[in-house]
Amino acid sequence: MRVLCVCMGNICRSPTAEAVLRELARREAPELTLEVDSAGTHGYHVGDPPDPRAVAAAARRGYDLSPLRARQFTAKDFERFDLILAMDEDNRATMLRQGSGRVELLLSYAPQWGERNVPDPYYGGEAGFERVLDLIESAARGVIESLGQMDASSASR
């Protein structure tokens, strides 16, 4: 299963989601074969590493964002990925204007939060990055559970 996490610039939310989803799947569902990537709907930061504040917040929880580099979402990603997870409704709409595919809001996998959009922490402080991690960790576990159920149902056929 190939999963793509997408935000606007690919330096805060989506690389965090990429690293969290990859690591939690490795730790909690090693039976899942999962390829995870991230991208931004805008090319502002192509080739740049994640925001240092995102890197630091993630590292405190055991996630390594340091090898990641920003890239821009393209229409070809619809063909390459089985599931595309948008961090918010604006970025979901931007992607869907480029083509069609399975684009869902990441937080649809964490309904307990009662939120649809992962807030962009870029202009905020440390607490914003911690909040993003809380939301993403919950949603990543929901994604893993959902993919595990899909995997189990296809294996039983």
Image (spheres, rainbow, N blue to C red):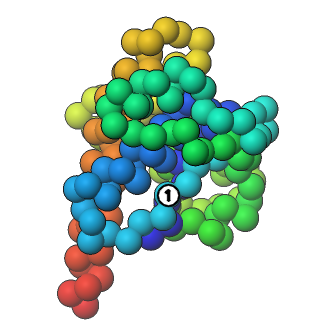
Number of numbered labels in the structure image: 1
In the image, residue 25 sits, relative to residue 108, either above or below, namely: below
Question: Does residue 92 show up?
Answer: no
* Picture residue at 44% right of the left edge, 12% below the top: 126
Residue position marked by numbered label 1 in the rendering: 36
Q: Answer above or below: position of 93 versus 78.
A: above
Task: Pick whichever, 131 or 110, lies toward us.
Answer: 131
> Three-letter amino acid code at disc 1?
Val
Q: Locate residue 42 relative to residue 6 in the image: left or right.
A: right
Disc 1: CA contacts within 10 A as few (<14), some (14-19) or many (>=20) = many
Which residue is at the front of the view, 111 or 18? 18
Residue 141 to residue 13: above or below:
below
Question: What is the x, y in percent for residue 76?
Answer: 73, 64
As drawn, is 105 to the left or to the right of 42? left
Instruction: Locate the C terminus and report the quarter of the image it occupies.
Output: bottom left
Q: Quadrant of residue 58?
A: top left
Inspect this view and state whether residue 136 appears: yes
Residue sitting farthest toward the bottom: 157
The N terminus, quarter of image: bottom left
Residue 139 position within the rendered picture, expressed as x and y whole percent measured from the top left: 33, 42
What residue do we see at 28% from left, 39% from top?
138
Q: Is residue 84 left or right of 74 when viewed as pictured?
A: left
Nearer to the camera, 96 or 109: 109
User: Image point 49% across, 9% down: which residue?
Assistant: 125
Secondary structure of the residue carrying tag 1 is strand
**Image position, residue 99 (x, y; %):** 71, 59
Query: Residue at image x 35%, y 27%?
Result: 60
Please state if 32 lies on the left or on the right of 118 as rendered.
Answer: left
Residue extending furthest top?
Answer: 125
Residue 54: % across, % down: 50, 26
* As drawn, 153 above or below 65: below
Q: In which quarter of the image is residue 45?
A: top right
